[in-house]
Each structure stands twice: as structure tokens, then as C-alpha cells.
Image (cartoon, rainbow, N blue to C red):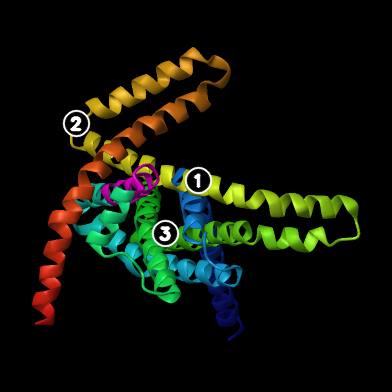
Amino acid sequence: MSTGLIALLDDIALIARKAAVTLDDVAAQATKAGAKAAGVVIDDAAVTPRYVVGFAAAREIPIVRRIAIGSLKNKLIFLLPAALALSLFAPWAITPLLMLGGAYLSYEGTEKVLEVLFPHAAHAHEAAIGVAAPDPQAAEDAKVRAAIGTDFILSAEIMAIALATIPEASLASQAAILATVGIGITVVVYGAVALIVKADDAGLAMSLSPSAAIAALGRGLVKGMPYFLTALSIVGTAAMIWVGGGIILHGLEGYGVTQPGHLVHAIAHAAGAAVPALGGVVTWIVAAAGAGVVGLAVGAALIPIVQTVILPLLARVRGTKAH
């Protein structure tokens, strides 16, 4: 009896040790996968705040919360099963799907550039595709939908990068690692976004402090945050374009069309070599600019196609379904 109990306890201890090792391995692999996707995570954090700019302060955190919940759904309900299924049954489909996502990011980013450079043309395009919102709640809903749509593309890129770092893992381990990466990145990104959009409120509270230094810092935050948010909105738009262009360049290389990507890399490395003290920074900036040119070209080509071909077809399909 006692021998059987001891054997049972030994088995339980062995299972517990194996579980601990597995959890440690998942955590290590998730950290590695998250680090590989760091560039897209930064872009995600830069893109999101622009969807909150322009709303009342009381709506900022609720909007961020809605987008964060949508982001979790994107990653855990849609993208994680899809990534595993594609990895098992149709790995060939991952690249074209990512390229479609890159085209979407390029289109949306180029729309924002069009709005700044040619506001009348942008308003005409918006009227044609029917994006004008009739009331504040509809405007908020439209912004949230747009943010979740953009997050879907960025999250797909994050999950694809994470999956590529663990090709030899079992299906269960892949699922656990992707879920850990998805939850962790969502918490980090949207926690940072919430801090950013509420920094001016924190600054206002600090400005009332009896400490002169804290009060001065608070006033600086209040005065500086509008400029910071504007700059972040610009960076977010640029990030959409260069990430979209980068995804397209990488996808083309996968299909043997290497010349555009090689040209961008060659120019970037030459620029970095010309400034040895800042070689890495200059190389990254020039590479991002090259990807941005590709993204702008794709986005500019898609704007009339979306307006005159894609949306009329969607409207016809919806009308047929309604009928």
C-alpha cells in the first residue's frame, strides 16, 4: 500500500516537473517569438493612438478598451486557429494572404496622406466609398472598426513572424506559444496606448501639486501632449505605409521577384556605410523609406480600384443578399 502510494507520488512529481519544463519552454519560446516581432509591435503601438485623437477625454479609455478586446479576438479567435491550420494544410497561402494585408495597410495609410495633401480629393473619395458618420457614436464605432481592421493585419504579421520562429514545435506548443505572444503583446501595446492618451490628464493632476517641480512637469505634459499625439499620428500613418510596403517586398522575394527588395536593401546599406557612426540607424531609416515608397505606390494604385471596382462589387453582393 505504502509502496504504491510512494510510486504514485513519484509519478505525480515527474508529471509536475515535465509540466514546469514545458511551461518554461513555452515562456522562453514566446519571449523569443515576441522579440522577433518587435518591429511590428512598435508599429502597432504607433498606429493605434491616432484612432483615439479627436474624441472627448471621457471616451478615450473606453475606445482603447474596445480596440484591445477586438485585438484579442483577432489574435486568439481568428488568427491563432487560422495560423495553425494554414501551417498544417496550406502553408503556401500564408504569403499571399500577408501580401493582401500589406496592400490593405498601404491603402489605408495612403488615404491619410491623400487627406493631408489633397483634402478635396480625399473628401470626394470618402463620399464615394461612404465613410462619413452621421453622429458621434457612429463616428466612434467607425473608428473602432477601422482600428480593429488595421490591428488584424498587424496582428497577422506578428503571429506569422512568431510562428516562423517555432517551426519544429508540436501543434500544442505552437498554440500555447502563439496564445502567450498574442496576449502579452496586446497587454503591452494597449497598456502603452492607454498611458499615452491619458498622459495629459495625468499632467493636469500633476500641475496642481504643491511641489513646483512636479507642477512644472505636469504643465509641460499638458502643453506637450497635443504635439506628441500629432507626431505619433504621423508616425502611425507612416508605419502603416512602410510596414505594408515591407510586407509586399518580402512577399515578392518569396516568389522570386527579388529586384525591388535588393534595390531597397542596397541603397539602405550604402547610405548606412556613408555614415559609419550612425550606420544602423541610417540603414533602417532608408530601408523603411524605400518600403514606404512601395507602400505609397501600391496604396495610390488601390484608391481608384477600391472606389470604382471593389466597393461597387461589394455593394452589389450585399444588395443581392438583402434581396
**Magenta stretch holds residue 105:** yes
Please state the horizontal and vertical placement of residue 292, each as a whole percent of the image.
Answer: 36, 36
Amino acid residing under circle 3? Leu
Sequence-wise, the earlier of marks 3 and 1 is 1
**Which residue of the protein is positioned furthest toward the top in this rendering?**
274
Q: Which residue is mark 1?
A: 35
Q: Are marks 3 and 2 in contact (CB under 8 Å)?
A: no
Q: Residues within 10 Å of mark 1 (few under 14, many from 20)?
A: some
Label for residue 178? Answer: 3
Q: Could you tell whether 74 is left or right of 53 in the image?
A: left
Q: Are marks 1 and 2 in contact (CB under 8 Å)?
A: no
Please state the horizontal and vertical placement of residue 127, each as a whole percent of the image.
Answer: 27, 61
Which one is closest to the eye, mark 1 or mark 2? 2
Q: Which residue is mark 2?
A: 257
Residue situated in front as seen by the camera: 309 or 174: 309
Please state the horizontal and vertical placement of residue 120, each as a whole percent of the image.
Answer: 32, 50
Identify the residue at horizontal 39%, vertical 74% (top origin). Answer: 138
Q: Secondary structure at mark 1?
A: helix
Please state the horizontal and vertical placement of residue 91, each as a whole percent of the image.
Answer: 22, 51
Label for residue 294? Answer: none
- Label 1, label 2: how far apart the Cα atoms are: 28 Å
- Label 3, label 2: how far apart the Cα atoms are: 30 Å
Q: Secondary structure at mark 3?
A: helix
- The stretch of residues the image draws in magenta is 103-119
